[in-house]
Image (tube, coloured by chain):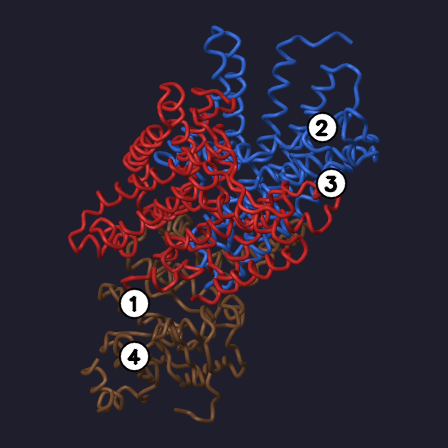
Amino acid sequence: MSPLPPVAIDFVNFLIPAGIFAIIALGLNVQWGHTGLFNAGVAAFIGLGAYTAAILMTGPAPATNQYPGHLGGFSWPFLAAVIVAMVVAGVAGLLIALPILRLRADYFAIATLALAETVRLFFTNAEDITAGTIGIILIPRPIVIADPGLSDVVMAGLVITTLFLAYFVIQYLTKAPWGRVLRGIREDEEATLALGKNTFRFRLSAFVVGCIVMGLAGAFLAAFLRFVTPTQFDPLSTFTIYVMVILGGSGNNRGVIFGAFLFYAFDWVSVRVKDFLPASLQGPIPYVRLMVIGALLVILVLYRPEGIFREKKRTYPPVVRE
Amino acid sequence: MRPDVAPILETRDIVKTFGGIRALDGCSLQVQPRTISGLIGPNGAGKSTLFSTVVGLYPPDHGEVYFQGRRIDGFPTHQLVGMGMVKTFQIPRELRDLTVLENLMLSARGSPGERLLSLLLFWRKDVERREGEVQAKAEDLLRFVGLFDLRDEYAKNLSGGQKKLLELSRALMTDPDLILLDEPVAGVNPTLSLKILDLIEQLRDQGKTIFLIEHDMEVVMNRCDWIVVLHQGRKLAEGQPTQVRSDDRVVEAYLGA
Amino acid sequence: MNRDLVVVLLVIAVFTVAMWTVYGVPVLQFLINGVVVGSIIVLGATGLSLIYGIRKFGNFAHGEMMTFGAYMAFLISVSFAMNIIWGLIFGVFMAAMLGILFELLVFRKLAGRGPVAALVASIGIAIFMNNLINATFGTQINVYNLQIAQSLVLLTIDGRPVLTINPIKGLATLAVSAVLIIFLHVVLSRTTLGKAMRATSDNPDLARASGINIRNVILWVWAISGGLAAVAGVLLGIVNDVRPAMGFSILLFVFAAVIIGGIGSPYGAMLGGLIVGIAGELSVALLAWLGRPTVLGLDNPTAYRPVAAFVIMILVLLLRPAGLGGRRGPTLRTRRILRVPRWAKRERAQ
């Protein structure tokens, strides 16, 4: 088995996280792009999926002098772990949304942010379960292959396949009458209610669907990085996804996938550019990248809130009459 | 009126208070089926509040509402639409970034495609068939009101009068027995007004009941079968247009308001 | 007094008495700490509340405003080796200017677009500012050039100090906060600017029609809000050292305080700030009393301290079901949850 050329390795290492972000963006697109739900706790749902998968897939990890240990020893296969991760994220979404979904969009955002931070506190402090700040390590890849390069390629294939599947399912759902009601709710919830739709149920289902997708992505994240820590799921991660969604075009499924890839490409390039800069300028680079995120958010909101790809107008070919 | 026929809508002693002001102060009235009934009264009489209370946007503080003989006060709005009662908004609330056709298709009742379970468990035949029916009905309605050519236009791009038509057609898509129209021709040009009013008469002839709020006295007098006058949150008078017009109490209420 | 407010104060009182029976006088230390922390949150919350009042959105960048003020003061205090008071003044001035800049560059343009657009923009600004500070000052912990005196012992039992308060970190913080609150109250109730601010917040169209220059009033509000944030930041820097995440670490508490006290009401925010501070400390006491259960990491009683504030915030948000999302007209004015005591109401127009 010959080693892969470095370019291929680089590309694959770009594809995997970009694909995972694209899946998350699809989930957020259902919540925010289609329904107008400002979920500021995206990171928590990704984290729940990631930690669930990590706990299920790893071997036993008792506490030692150097390592706090975590709940584990199940050694489940990846597919089973992914399904449970999705369920956990979905149930969490349901429980979190039930009390707070009636709030107006900006209060909903603050409430979800507070709840997400609580989840993160749990990740950080419940050491017996999550190994605290050190996190869960030694997570196996979905398909264990000795050659690391090939393992990455296989992983990339899995991620992209899943991305396609997620895209098709979500496209189908959002093109259907269900998606139409969601967009109606986004436009004017009271009017949609007055037309006979139980808007609470629709918003709830949209929220849960989005959370399930985020849990899915979280499981992949755990399998890709092979370790999970609480700091991976801070509010900044949430807002990074928002940049991807808004940049690509909220409401447009293909657009947000593009937004995720585009943005991650910028990220990826900026990390590599650092190596070419003189040492004095290298320090601030990670912060410059984040400053760009912040500035992009402001500029997008001010001048191009619809993003690169506008939401498509949906037309229906005339009905065939006998 | 025909006292032997049960009223399609009845309120008994409705009280609704907003921050110290009794918008509805013991309002009791009836609407007979298959009529165009008008609700009039000076500003602040509580007309829009009555509509909103009846349709479930606010629960009444006191009193009962009956629709087709069933007690419905406190029922959520979406459930009432399912039972056959719908209300339009005084200022049209079009779903702006959806097309005209989508606005109507959304309004249809009972689409299995709105249920996630139906969508995911591959009952696609049902979903597609119903979508086709809904689309056909929406297109027919659009032709009826003359908006068919604008069906793929974003609702936000319609003119004011066209939005009013859209508002009305959306309500009709829900297949209602009782339609509550809040000022259906306010601010609409005379030609379009006529069209809307003729439409309303057609609907009544088809068996629907229309209960409308209007300030334009000509419209009310010429088109309504029955008029209820509201004043200070209570029913002041009711009767046929000619009776109401010459009722001293009504004249006084309008002059004094 | 408002009924909900009475309930909350009763709960706190009952809880404190319950803890007293278990721990005795040391429980008061929690209250003291809670009030000190709370007074910093109060300063942040009143500033945030002012922005809610005139621009009708939650300014997520408010935390970074506090961080900015703290770092500006740090510049003066350490780099220029001057008295911290000069640092404070400089920080206030710079933050006020920054607030005006935000309004002119961003928020004026977002005026008609609803609370969500402004919130997202403020998030972008917050991320930008936070990382600008990281890039410029580095991520290490900094300390002001300030002598922290020994804590004063307020009460001893059997020769052991039981209640203490630090003259700088505790008393000075309380004093500065109190002075600023009184100052704000005077401005709001007795000056022309204050009345204009209240009028603009209540009903901008009416205010404009009465001849008030809305645009200038709004700029003043941003300046005052920035100034208050800067002072809060400096105080936080004194109590907890100057670090880049300081503003964000307190931001959610500040939001909780504003929501608990009532959006758009500066006086409510003051109350909310104290409640948040005290509730946080009392939750530590509660966990300690529960015997430090070792599950979920609850044996570290300060670990979940934010949760108390969050729970109260969400309960408050739910007690008044905010109705459906989206367009609802002048919503913020009706968002009062714990109503202001009558002495603070003054001529609040109906």
Which amino acid type corresponds to the residue marked 2 in the rendered image?
Ala
- Residue B141 on image: x %, y %: 42, 62
Which mark lies nearer to you, 4 or 2? 2
Quadrant position of the N terminus of chain A in the picture: top right
Which mark lies nearer to you, 1 or 2? 2
Identify the chain drawn in brown: B
* Disc 4 and disc 1 on one polypeptide chain: yes
Q: In the rendered structure, find residue B40 and report the number of the disc placed on it.
A: 4
Q: In the rendered structure, find residue B195 and report the number of the disc placed on it.
A: 1
What secondary structure is found at the residue carrying circle 1? helix
Colour in which the image shows chain C: red
Frontmost residue, A207 versus C261: C261
- Residue C13 on image: x %, y %: 56, 60
How crowded pointer 4 is (Cα within 10 Å; few <14, some 14-19, many 20+) is rated as many
- Residue B26 on image: x %, y %: 40, 85
Badge 4 or badge 1: first in the primary sequence: 4
CA separation, marks 1 and 3?
A: 57 Å
Please tell me which residue is depicted at 22% across the width and 91% down the height of the picture. B248
Which amino acid type corresponds to the residue marked 4 in the rendered image?
Ile
